Image (cartoon, rainbow, N blue to C red):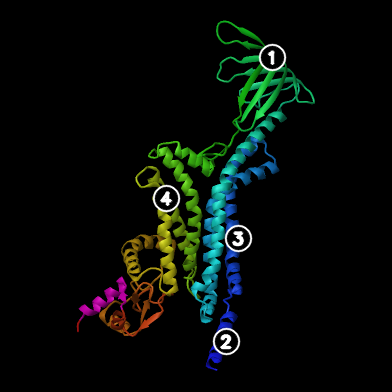
Amino acid sequence: MHSESGKKKRDEEGGARRSFRWRPPLLLYSYIANELLAPFFASFLILYCVFFLVRLIPLLDIVLSLRIGLADFIRLFAYIFPHMLLYIIPMASMAGVIVGFTRLASDREILAFKACGVSLVQMLPPVLVILAVIACLTGLFSIQLIPAGALGVKQLMFQLAKEKIDKGLKEKEFTEALGDIVLYVDKIDKQQRWHGVYVSDMRGRTEPLVTVAKQGQMHADMEQMLVTVVLNDGTLHNTEGMDNQTIRFGRYQLRISLRPPTTIGKEDLSSQTRGAMTQEQLSAAASQLDPDSKAARIYLSEYHNRMVLPVGCFILGVIGLPLGLQASPGRRAVGIPLGLAVFITYYIALTTCRALGETGILPLVPSLWLPNVIFTLLAISLLWRTYQEKPLLPRQIRQLWYVVYESLLKKIIRPIISRLRKPVHNGHSKGIDTSSDAVSETTALHVHADVNTGIFHLPPCKNYNCPTCRLRFKNPRVAREAGFTPCEFCATLLAQKADGPQ
C-alpha cells in the first residue's frame, strides 16, 4: 500500500512537470519589436535621404557626361547603395532602440511592465534578435554586396561608354566619342560592319596618325574595358618627322582603353581598390606579400574591418537600450544626444585603432577589434546599472564632471549663452542679498538635492528648482550627512554664514 501511494505521488509530480511548459511571452516580444522597428525604419529613411542628397550632387557629373537614362541611373545608384548602408544601418538601429525605449519610458509603460513583474532581462530577447538580424544584414552588405556593387559599377560604366560611342557613331559624320581619336564611317550595314573608314589618332602625338581602310568593325572587352577597332585593307599615314610614311596593311587593330568619368568626389567607382575586392582576393593578396609589410597590413585591415563593422552595429544597438531608458515623464530625454556622442566616439576609436594597426604601431588584428571589446564592456556595464536602477555613471565620475563643468566649461559656455539671450535676473544677480541674516533665513528652508550629481542647492541658488532636484532635506547639515555636497554658489553662502558673527 505504501508503494502504491508513493507511485501515485510520483505520477502526480511527473504529470505536473509535463504540464508545466515555459512559453515565451510572444505578445510582449511583438509589442517591443513593433516599438523598435517603427523608429528604425523612420530613421533609416531619413538618413538614407540625407546620404542620397550628399551623393547625388557629384553623381550628376557622371549622369550628364554619359547621358544616363532613368533606368541606368537607378542601376548605378543601386550599385553604390551598399557603401552608404555601412553607416546608415548602425545609426538607424541605435536610433530605433533609443527612440523606442524613450517613448516607452516617457509614457510610463516601462513602469507598468515592472509593476506586472516584467524585468529588463525579459525585455532583452526581442531587442537582441532584431539587432542580430540587422547586424547580419550589415555583414551581408559589408562582405558580399560592396565588392559585387563595385564590379557592377565598372561594367555599367563601360557599357554606358560603349553605348555613347555607338549612339555617336553615325554614317557620314565625324565622331569624337573616343577622346583623342576621331572616327569617320561612310556606311554601316545591318551587321554593324563599317565601309569607308577614316581614323585620326592624336594619342601622345603632335601630328595625327591617319588610317584609311575599306572595311572595319568594333569589338568590346568588358573585363579589360578595352575597345578594339579592326580595320581591313587600308593604309596608315604617319606625318611626324622629316619624312612622311605610308604603310599598307591587310588587317590592322587599334586598341582603345575606355576611361569614362567614374569619380564621385575623391572615390573612383570603377577602380579595383581594396574596398572593391572580395574576402578571398584580400586574403590572397595579403598572403603574397611580406606579413610585416605595410601593404599586407592594409589588405588584412580591410579583411577584418568588414567583420568588425557588423559586430559594432550590434553593440551600438545594445548601448541604445539603457540610453533610451533614461527618459521619464517630466524629464528631458537625453538618449539621442548621448547616442550620437557614443556613435561618433566609436567610429573615431575604430578609425584611430585601424590607422595604428596599419602603420604597425599596434598589432593589427587586436587593434581592429579593440573598440568592439571596449564598447562591449561599456554596454554590459550600462545594462547592469540600468537593471539595478542606478544612474549610468558612477557618483565619482558625475562629481568629477560637475567640477569640470563648474570650473571650466561653464565659464566658456555661459558668456556665449548670455549673448544669445536677454539678460535675466537670477539667483546670482545683484538683487540677491548675501548677508549673513539672509543666509540664515534661507538655510532654514528646505534644501533641494540632485540624486544624479550628489549636489544640493539653497533657495537663493538659480538651480534650486532644477527638474532633477527631487530630494528634499530639512537643512544643509542633514544633506551633508546623507552624502550630498553644496554647489559652488551655495558653498560660498554657507561659508559666509560660518564666518559671520555668532
Ranked by sequence position, the earlier of labels 2 and 4 is 2
Mark 1 vs mark 2: in front: 2
* 296 sits to left or right of 245: left
Question: Residue 313, position in %: x, y?
Answer: 50, 57
Question: Residue 272, position in %: x, y?
Answer: 54, 37
Question: Residue 448, position in %: x, y?
Answer: 37, 79
**Res. 224 image quadrant:** top right
In the orientation shown, which residue stands out farthest toward the top? 243
Relative to the observer, which residue lies in front, 93 or 265?
93
Span shown in magenta? 483-500
Rounded to the nearest angstrom, the CA distance separating label 2 from label 4 is 57 Å
Q: Which residue is rendered at x = 52% and y = 73% of the image? A: 122
Mark 1 vs mark 4: in front: 4
Contact, mark 2 vs mark 3 (Cβ under 8 Å): no
> Which residue is disc 4 drawn over?
368
> Mark 4: which amino acid?
Leu
Rounded to the nearest angstrom, the CA distance separating label 1 from label 4 is 60 Å
- Residue 334 appears in the picture as rendered: no
> Which residue is disc 1 drawn over?
212
Ranked by sequence position, the earlier of labels 1 and 3 is 3
> Mark 3: which amino acid?
Phe
Badge 4 crowding class, 10 Å Cα cut-off, few under 14, some 14 to 19, many 20 or more, is many
Contact, mark 1 vs mark 3 (Cβ under 8 Å): no
Quadrant of the image for the C terminus?
Answer: bottom left
Ranked by sequence position, the earlier of labels 2 and 3 is 2
Badge 2 crowding class, 10 Å Cα cut-off, few under 14, some 14 to 19, many 20 or more, is few
> Mark 2: which amino acid?
Glu
The image's mark for residue 41 is 3
**Mark 1 element type:** strand
**Res. 386 image quadrant:** bottom left
Relative to the observer, which residue lies in front, 358 or 50?
358
**Mark 3 element type:** helix
